[in-house]
Amino acid sequence: MLPPSSTTSPSYSSKKPPRSTQVVLDALGAVPHASVQELHDWLRANRPKRSAGLTTIYRTLHYLVQQHQVQRVYLQDGQARYDLLTKTEHPHHHHHLVCTRCQHVEVLHDCPLETLESLIESAQTKFKLHYHNLELFGLCESCQAG
């Protein structure tokens, strides 16, 4: 489950996509788990004629999160980071394994929490979940060897 997008993003409601949508999607394809500043830097270096300002990138990301094309995540550094979502990811999200030494991030496409969600939302607890987030921290294979 994804967190509600309105709680941490600028207000932006539009039925049509921002003009910068494809440019931001291209940057996300090139820079996985990117912060807004990293996307801005990549666009300035690689698409100077089609680059976008920080405000435009924030608005575009907000739109893409609402459209379930992008997922906002918070990794070890505490910054909001953004990932492209594939059409096969269900229910529209994925989780991460984060190396605490080299900061390498691996994606878990399958959600190991679906069964737990069902148990929590059972009639016994009467708790309605809105979203969850799972990032696991440890050492990647390379850092374990070194």
Image: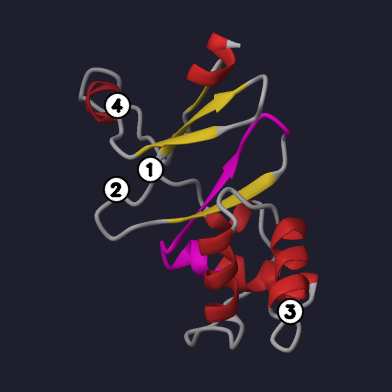
Which residue corresponds to mark 4? 112
Residue 80: numbered disc = none
Residue count near mark 4 (Cα–Cα under 10 Å), binned few <14, some 14–19, many ≥20: few
Task: Report the span colored magenta.
Answer: 63-77
Q: Nearer the viewer, mark 4 or mark 1?
A: 4
Frontmost of labels 4 and 3 is: 3
* First reached walking from the N terminus: tag 4 or tag 1: 1
Residue drawn at (54%, 10%), measured in percent from left and top?
145
Q: Earlier in the sequence, mark 4 or mark 3?
A: 3
Say whether residue 88 is left or right of residue 23: left
Element under disc 1: loop
Q: Earlier in the sequence, mark 3 or mark 2?
A: 3
Q: Label for residue 1?
A: 1
Can residue 86 be seen from the camera position used here? Answer: yes
Q: Mark 3 or mark 2: which is in front? A: 3
Q: CA gap, disc 3 to disc 1?
A: 30 Å
Q: Position of residue 119 (x, y in %)?
A: 23, 21
Q: Which residue is mark 3?
A: 52
The span from disc 3 to disc 2 (Cα, nearest Å) is: 30 Å
- The answer to the question of whether label 2 and label 1 lie on touching residues, with beta carbons closer than 8 A, is yes
